[in-house]
Image (cartoon, rainbow, N blue to C red):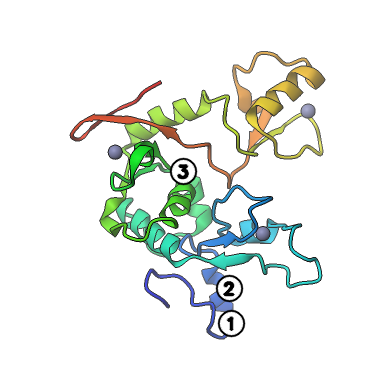
Amino acid sequence: MIDGGATNIDSPTTPSNFGKLELATSTFFCKSSSNHNGLPVCGGDDIDSHRCYTFPASGPRYQCLSYDHRASSAVVALLAAANLDPNTTADQIDQLDLRFHCPSLPDELHRLAMSWRDAAFHARRFDQLQPSAWEVLSPEETAAIKQKEEANTGDVRYRFRCNICVHSSWIRRRDVETHLIGWHQIVDHSDPTTEFELHSRVPPNPVTFSSSEEGSASFTV
Ligand SMILES: [Zn+2]
Ligand SMILES: [Zn+2]
Ligand SMILES: [Zn+2]
């Protein structure tokens, strides 16, 4: 183990080492920028389904992935902030779908309500974040943030797909709405999830909230 609780991938591989790949702290990132949103490739399903077409097909399949210690340390801090076991898997924390906040981040970043994957992504870029810098948002704050995320038709992540077509691919929110209108004549998305599916491992584009006073967060629309 290295500091931060993640797998030391240099040690001999055993079945239990493979198990550690399921942990949320096993934060890998794709080195290719051309076909990836920059979020961690984390958890067995995520790694299994990762395809990188910019690296030579003749090379080892996962050569584009590299472990990031700083992001892993941040995930340790997120798990502690949320009172979760350090051995929480990526699947488990994906399902919890919490939102985190880091007042120590500069500029506009400290006003972002982040999924754990977004928090790992941002933590990777800052080397002096204290573990205690991360806070989990309350259920009330998180509910308000999720409403704002759902209303964000400008979400540019490839995390939506048509539920009516059989072989649909992951596209952006605006594109799925255009598709629903053009192909299925569906204009009213009163209950969008029946018409389109959301990717379970790609969180919404983070939205901002403003902390107006100590201890009380208010949300801007
Ligand atoms: Zn890749
Ligand atoms: Zn803040
Ligand atoms: Zn369709």
As helix, strand or loop, the secondary structure at mark 2 comes to: helix
**What amino acid type is highlighted by mark number 2?**
Phe
Determine whether 172 is above or below 63 in the image: above
Circle 3 residue? 97
Q: Is mark 2 within 8 Å of ligand 1?
A: no
Whether residue 195 is visible, yes or no, is no
Residue 215 vs residue 171: left or right?
left
**What amino acid type is highlighted by mark number 1?**
Thr
Circle 2 residue? 18
As helix, strand or loop, the secondary structure at mark 3 comes to: loop
Q: CA distance from mark 2 to mark 1?
A: 7 Å
Q: Which mark is residue 13?
A: 1
Q: Earlier in the sequence, mark 2 or mark 1?
A: 1
- Looking at the image, which residue is at 41% across and 31% down? 145
As helix, strand or loop, the secondary structure at mark 1 comes to: loop
Q: CA distance from mark 1 to mark 3?
A: 31 Å
**What amino acid type is highlighted by mark number 3?**
Asp
Task: Looking at the picture, tell me which residue is in the foreground, 210 or 177.
Answer: 210
